[in-house]
Image (tube, grey):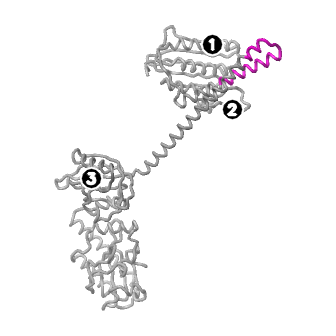
Amino acid sequence: MQGTPDTDSEAERDRLRALRRFEIMDTAPEPEFDRIAELAASLADASVALVLFVDAHRQWHKAAVGTECSEIARERSLGALTIETEGPTVIEDVEETEWGRKTPLVEGASQAHFYAGVPLVTPDGYRIGAVAVLGRTHRVVDTDTLGQLQHLADIASEALVERQYALGGTEEVSQTVLDHLPGIFYVLGPKGRLKRWNARFERISGYEPGELAGLKATRLFEGQDRERVAEAITTVFEEGAATVEADFVSKAGDSVPILFSGVRTYVQGTPHLAGMGIDVSEQHRQARELRKAKEEAEEASRIKSAMLQNLSHEIRTPLTSIIGFSRVLEEKLSGEEARIAGLVHDGGKRLKGTIDSVLQLSKLETGTEELSREHIDLTEVVTEVADLLRPQAEENQQEFVTAMPTAPIEGHWNRGALRRITENLLENALKFTPEGGRVTLRVRGTEAAAILEVEDTGIGISEEALPGIFEAFKQESEGLDREYEGSGLGLSNVRKLTDLLGGTVEVESEKGSGTRFTVRLPIDDSR
């Protein structure tokens, strides 16, 4: 039925809050509103004119002409119908509507037949009442009359705001601002009891205004949260400010995690607490999802690491035997048989290198690779690796140049990590440098860093491929028909080992001209 509102809806609750802010219901007659009713009756040639307000249960008359009726139940109220409509409400013959005939103003001696009402709207858009007229005869209300009634409704709205200013300054305006804040707002008196709050506070709590007024704030929390909130309130009054996160418990028993912050303020010389709260439910949900994802990732990483270690053990043991026996066969046999044995030996070594690289990468990614540090001369380690790989360069007919300082370059590093960094960079340079090319290995130092450079005159790297060269299993040439063999793990391991040592690795390259890798390691890093 029209005129019967959904009082549980959020929109209706907001409308009733707006009405309560003006404190107009059940107040004594006032000349401003009386004059509006008199003008409405005269302009519309009506027998009854009203300035009315509608709360949850009734239509109440602030000013009335032509009737002594002071209020009407909402379910029998024409004013309730008016506030549910954005524009004017006009009924040419009220008696034609079954529920309209039950309206006291129609049943009474006035025998009203036509009705016209215009909503009384607050500055923030809430329809809390109306300026309405009723007449004894059937008639059509013309546009000019409706315009005049609209003008009177606007005047009534202005009078309402002026009245509010006279009663308490800018209370209505400030409450409107508070009601539109994104979080909850509240003011507690010296004893921690609620004195003021905004619409969002009321909605989340589920309490009616009469239940909230004077309520001890800690009553809205349970268990340890209640104790922590009480401590925070005490801190605000004693120290000036505090923040606490707690579950805000509604009247229905639902809880919402809220981050509360409060500051001490003074009202007429008396200390009060003014605070705000932000719903952090979404942050909690995201944190739970991140925590779950982290746990799943750690478990997956643990399983991968264990699997790789098991596979490494199961494969490397027989592979070592295959490499050893194939070398013996290569030395003992001759001709085609020796060539086949050599292929088996070389394939085994390449497979073992791939397995070692995968296992090393797994340890680096899962954090199980622990690098103990000691005082080391970088030049000494690099020279040892260079001596091991020099025969490979000679076999490939490549020029292998080393430039080492005469004085040691020392720092707190891990010997194995330095060897692997140097080996990977040199092996890459030798692999991608053609016969007759040059590979240069340099070591130098500054006051802050030791610098290792590996430069070649090989095939180089295209500009498009450079950003991804340190990614695992990434090679510029990919697929089964790629020109150069390899797992694509060497440079990834170089980057991770350098990071563990607190250093950096950079690359400069030009397709067809060569590549230079530069590793910088902090000398004074004693971690």
Percent of width and height locating residue 152: 31, 76
x 35%, y 76%: residue: 150
Q: For the residues carrying marks 2 and 1, which lies nearer the camera in this image?
A: 1
Q: Amino acid at mark 1?
A: Leu
Percent of width and height locating residue 133: 33, 83
Identify the mark nearer the N-term, 2 or 1: 1
The reply, left or right, for residue 508 in relation to residue 66 is right
In this view, the residue farthest toward the left is 269
* Mark identifier at residue 472: none
The reply, left or right, for residue 148 in relation to residue 282 is left
SS state under label 3? strand
Identify the mark nearer the N-term, 3 or 1: 3
x 60%, y 13%: residue: 386
Viewer-closest of 239 and 30: 239
SS state under label 2? loop
SS state under label 1? helix
Q: Main secondary structure of the magenta part?
A: helix
Q: Which residue is mark 1?
A: 388
What range of the chain is rendered magenta? 325-353
Q: Quadrant of residue 474?
A: top right
x 59%, y 34%: residue: 304
Circle 3 residues within 10 Å: few <14, some 14–19, many ≥20: many
Q: Amino acid at mark 3?
A: Ala
Q: Amino acid at mark 2?
A: Glu
Identify the mark nearer the N-term, 2 or 3: 3
Percent of width and height locating residue 488: 64, 28
The reply, left or right, for residue 394 in relation to residue 98 is right
* Mark identifier at residue 478: 2
Q: Which residue is mark 3?
A: 274
